[in-house]
Amino acid sequence: MNLRNIFILSVTLASLAACSTNQSTSPSKRDGTASISQFQAQERAKVISDVNYQLAYTFTGESRFTASTKVTFNLSSTSKAITLDLNKADITRFVVNGTKLYPSYNGAYITINSSLLTSGENTIEVDFSREHSTNGEGLHRFVDPVDGKVYLYSHFEPAAAQQMFAVFDQPDLKANYQLSVIAPADWHVISTMRESSIEARGATKLWQFPLTPKLSPYNFSMHAGPYHVWQDNSAAYPMRLFARQSVVSQVAPQDWFTYTRQGLAFFDRYFGINYPFKKYDQLLVPDFLYGAMENAGAITFSENYFLTSAPMTAQQKESLASVIMHEMAHQWFGDLVTMKWWNGLWLNESFASFMGTLATSEATEFHHAWRTFYAKGKQTAYHQDSLVTTHPIEVPVATSANAFDNIDAITYQKGASTLKQLRHLLGDDVFRQGVSKYLTKYSYQNAQLSDFIASLADAGNRDLSRWTKEWLYSAGVNSLKVQFQCRGNQISQFALIQSAPSPELPTLREQKVQVALFNKGRHYLEQQQVVAVTYKGRFTNVPELVGEICPDLVYPNFEDWGFVKVQLDEKSFKTAKQELSNVHDPLLRSMLWQSLWDSVVDGKTGLDQFINVALVNAPLEQDYTILGQVIANLHQAMDYLNAMAPSQKAYTDKVAKAFSQMSLRRAMESHKDSDFQRRWFDAYVAFSHNGAALSHLSQLLDGKTKVQGLTLSQDLRWDIIRQLNRYDFPQSVQRLQAEKHQDNSDAGQKAAIAAEVIRPEAALKRQWLNTIENNEHMPFSKIRVAMDNLYPSEQQLFSAATAEQRLANLPYTDNKGPVFMRSYGAKLIPTSCSYAGISALDRVLDTNTNLTALTRRAVLEARQEEHRCVRIKAQMSN
């Protein structure tokens, strides 16, 4: 008889009755699931305060762990039962205020009858065991396929702390945490605080940790395993970096410590508040759902993005610096001061995105970080904000299960762009003072948007209520164009014209931008005049520009102060196409490239015209960031062309060959610049569709030919093998199997899945689709790789073969939860660049009215993308 049954037999009937008595129903009664509504969380926070957790764990490396939680708290009212969250645990002991009881537990939370509680201090003790998770939430367990070592890490956002301990799992019930852990002797244990003692106990060690400052549950963390550790004490705070033993050679610790040291110094100065958590630990962890997570004092990062089998490129270093800064900003804005409920999550993420970019640009060598932000993240925000599913930055969140429903580029990059232009509106110093006031006033507390805005308004002595309404509670991106007239080669009239996204989204906003005039010079486009303009409403005169020389090009958001889609006037658009390589200002050149691409996406210019401009100008591009932007556009162009098959088959093959040849030529010419060479060579691999290019890639793998200056790292080898399998090049399956045998690492296993899944074989596709939709044993990180690679854009016929099945199964897959559906919805909702595809998605929306908001949104976006592709196809001149 197991411990749980023994415990059950020992419980008295009286205590059983006391805990199971049915409380009178009320609006605050929960529905039996692990999520909690905002109203229920507010009701719980009204009566509970001064929370303290004592947490004890025993880890053996096996699939289950044992633990105990002792939570003490003050209760102001005993009129209603309360709930304590604990997900899918086997409870072996349950004590309320000294009395052992049988828990009223439904697998999601324990209900404690009010008769068992007292006004004032209460104590609840829960001993339990539980399976580790394998989906990246809760306390995740990973077995390294290389050496069999076991690694654990926690991830709690938004409400998965309940998968590791008994907890009031909501952000506004901040608490202190005291942790003790028994773990194998060769393990490290890492948490918010540095351990206070480590006691050897034979094959195990006991780790004790001091009491933490007050934290929301999702900001606390615990990680354990035989991690390799690097240490650096060159900053004001001790720094450590952890990674699995088998990937040590793929980590560049000095880069990590350099950017971390630079960031800590920058934020201490900027906020005027010292870093609050005394030490700075960072961990590279496998199977991670996101890029990184800002656990207080122990930040986790996804191995997927930050391990490399070759020296890091400039792009990878900048990305590393940027993510380090983003998570570091959260230590103040998110951990020190935390939102009250998940509707405030956007502010945490927007602010961290803004401050992370600012810190990267000012504290590291990547002074062009705002250009990277414009070319990548901001364009994603513009795209997201132009969809039918756009939403305000600040939106209600009904339950903790809905916390991530609207976490997207609007939340991150539009929010960051909004804060950036607010900084321009208020001035740099005023903005910084307002932020510092906010962090000082609400340290170790919870706050909300009105508190943040009030701090900025107070610092700037300005009413921001209208600004808040326009920018944070209204959806959609406005457009801006210039209207001017010239007489005698001089401007006689000049105005800015703002337009709303649609009649349904009528808001016109106020913001400050710079308007720049340019004229064609002998060798480059010459800047003539720049003026700062605060515009609002539909029409804003700009008298400062009257009398200036009539320009060849006008850009009304120079240096990217504003969040607005620029519509170039006809003359400026023509100049942009003709003079692109003669624009010396890299940010302006980036913005003009974007205007050309936007005209394609908006159905105003043929895709083939953009391709012609790119084939002429891309090889001339000398800026690394812009080159990445242009290549990304070319990849999108190829995806559109592939989707148009078979009507554009001949042209698509011709373009793919041209892109491939251009990329290889530039990779060979760039042998003295490893960053440029790697960027161009990556493009060459991805654009290699025809036999000659694929044969060349095969010869590179065999060492029969070389590209001067290029070393084929393990990552590159897998990229090539994936591409060879994508087009079923001879012997590609054998190459896959041989490489899989040589590289049994976690990254190698995932790369092998990608190469197998992408093969153009109908039976294999169906087999993997079944695995994706029905497998309950494969870790989600590998399922996600399969989703990403199942139907590349040129495999339209294979996608069509299962399209009906995938659409019919949507209600079933929708039940697999938001983590699953975020990936499934983005990759596996069928599209075909046709009116038939649009009709199929219409039927899904009409007949499946019970889809979750997240899945319905994915279908709506897929349908809009179908419309866009059809429109782009209609604009093709050939």
Image (cartoon, helix red, strand yellow):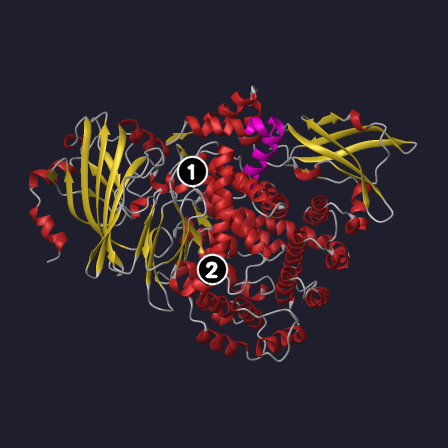
Give the image location of residue 277, x and y in percent. Answer: 38, 40
The quarter of the rendered structure image containing the C terminus is: bottom right
- Which residue lies at the image location 82% right of the left edge and 47% below the top edge? 524
The foreground one among 145 and 223 is 223
Residue 394 seen in the current view: no
Mark 2 to mark 1 CA distance (whole Å): 25 Å
Neighbourhood count class around disc 1 (C-alpha, 10 Å): few under 14, some 14–19, many 20 upward: many
Inspect the image, locate mark 1, and give the three-letter code of the amino acid beneath it: Tyr
Q: Is residue 258 left or right of residue 566?
A: left
In the rendered image, which quarter is residue 276 located in? top left
Give the image location of residue 622, x and y in percent. Answer: 71, 55
Q: Main secondary structure of the magenta part?
A: helix
State the residue position of label 2. 251
Give the image location of residue 73, x and y in percent. Answer: 23, 32
Q: Is residue 302 left or right of residue 480?
A: left
Per the image, label 1 sits on a secondary structure element best described as loop
Q: Which mark is residue 275?
A: 1
What segment is highlighted magenta in the picture? 413-431
